[in-house]
Image: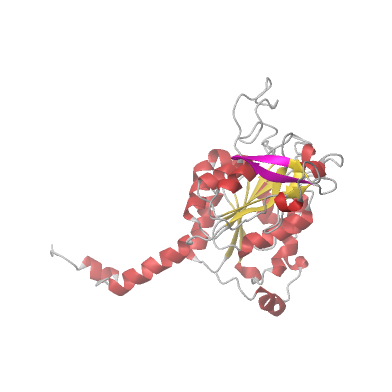
């Protein structure tokens, strides 16, 4: 799918957000972070230069997976954990479509975990939005693969004893080419990241830190509380120093082989000493360090963490099909059936 000349296509199509607002009642709890995600998504669709009939929204099972009903595009509400193969099949058979896969931490990282890592490995040109509220919300509060160890839930009344997944680590381990992280309280950043994900050629994976007000309220409070959010959020921008803090006076440097938080102005540290973000670096070492950062010792990295170029699956598949068609002596099924030894009975 050609993604250049977006501005020209946008002007020609003349679409607005209202063109993508569904007539279905949105059945998410009041205060759920999903509302902010939906609003940001509907806003960016007219900005992509894609015809309305060329969008497909695919989901599995979960609160987030109601998404296809709430966007006025083509969509498929699939079965638990199976959004990735459905989205993959759609994109491979019709590469001109813009395919968006909506999923949750339970849907994609538990029952759908195998599909999740393989769609990333194959680098199929779809966009994945993974809502991470660290709980099973639709089924009423069981711990999920991202619930921190010790979480007290309906299925872990003494606290879960399992190690939790870090979605960013999974993406990098599966050789994912695009990983970004946003939080549902920052709709402007969400919109910007959605557009960046669309422009990327290959599988783009966006982890959305999202709040479940009923079964895991304030799970991301360390990131959203007014008193702490500036010290706990590092919003990355390509080519810019990695700074954060209430006065934007803190930053990251390398201390040997590890990251270290420093304060500008102390111990002779200036902004030029800080690490500069390079989202296009093909070496995933720094990206891995960034996705693993967590309070209290580090801020959480938000924004586009990794965006690298690699061959896209469906492009290679189309090339192989064309080469086979040009070189094969068989041009039809009849040619195949009548090849080699045949018998009449």
Picture quadrant where residue 192 is located: bottom right
Residue extending farthest front: 268
Where does the image place residue 169, in percent across and percent down from the top left?
Answer: 57, 42
- Which residue is painted at 81% across and 49% down in the image? 248
Answer with left or right where residue 124 lies relative to residue 162: left
Q: Is residue 213 visible?
A: no
- Of 320 and 189, which appears nearest the observer? 189
Residue stretch in magenta: 250-261
Give the vertical position of 202 relative to 249 (above or below). Answer: below
Where does the image place residue 138, in percent across and percent down from the top left?
Answer: 68, 39
Q: Is residue 276 visible?
A: yes
Give the vertical position of 272 relative to 215 (above or below). Answer: below
Most frequent secondary structure within the magenta stretch: strand
- Of 177 and 127, which appears nearest the observer? 177
Give the vertical position of 333 relative to 106 (above or below). Answer: below
Q: State yes or no: residue 252 in magenta.
A: yes
Where does the image place residue 19, in percent across and percent down from the top left?
Answer: 74, 68
Q: Quadrant of the N terminus?
A: bottom right
Q: State yes or no: residue 173 in magenta.
A: no
Q: Quadrant of the C terminus?
A: bottom left
Answer with left or right where residue 198 lies relative to residue 315: right
- Of 341 and 127, which appears nearest the observer? 127
Where does the image place residue 307, in percent across and percent down from the top left?
Answer: 59, 57
Give the vertical position of 286 relative to 56 (above or below). Answer: above
- Which residue is painted at 74% across and 41% down in the image? 262
């Amino acid at each position: 799918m050609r993604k250049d000349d977006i501005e020209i296509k946008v002007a020609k199509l003349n679409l607005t957000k209202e063109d993508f607002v569904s007539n279905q009642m949105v059945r998410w709890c009041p205060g759920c972070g999903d509302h902010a995600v939906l609003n940001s998504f509907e806003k960016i669709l007219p900005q992509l230069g894609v015809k309305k009939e060329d969008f497909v929204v695919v989901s599995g099972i979960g609160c987030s997976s109601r998404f296809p009903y709430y966007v006025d595009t083509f969509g498929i509400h699939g079965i638990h954990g199976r959004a990735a193969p459905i989205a993959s099949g759609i994109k491979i058979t019709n590469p001109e479509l813009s395919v968006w896969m909506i999923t949750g931490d339970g849907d994609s990282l538990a029952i759908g975990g195998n599909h999740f890592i393989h769609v990333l490995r194959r680098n199929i040109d779809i966009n994945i939005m993974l809502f991470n509220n660290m709980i099973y919300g639709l089924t009423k509060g069981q711990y999920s693969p991202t619930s921190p160890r010790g979480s007290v839930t309906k299925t872990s009344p003494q606290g879960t004893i399992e190690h939790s997944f870090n979605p960013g680590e999974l993406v990098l381990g599966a050789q994912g080419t695009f990983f970004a992280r946003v939080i549902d309280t920052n709709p402007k950043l969400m919109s910007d990241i959605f557009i960046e994900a669309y422009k990327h050629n290959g599988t783009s994976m966006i982890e959305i830190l999202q709040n479940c007000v009923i079964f895991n309220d304030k799970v991301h409070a360390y990131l959203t509380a007014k008193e702490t959010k500036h010290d706990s959020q590092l919003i990355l921008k390509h080519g810019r120093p990695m700074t954060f803090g209430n006065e934007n006076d803190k930053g990251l440097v390398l201390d040997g082989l590890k990251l270290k938080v420093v304060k500008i102005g102390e111990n002779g540290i200036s902004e030029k000493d800080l690490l500069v973000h390079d989202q296009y670096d093909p070496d995933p070492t720094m990206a891995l360090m960034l996705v693993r950062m967590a309070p209290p010792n580090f801020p959480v990295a938000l924004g586009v963490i990794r965006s690298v170029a690699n061959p896209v699956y469906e492009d290679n598949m189309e090339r192989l099909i064309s080469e086979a068609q040009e070189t094969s002596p068989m041009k039809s099924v009849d040619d195949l059936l009548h090849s080699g030894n045949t018998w009449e009975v």
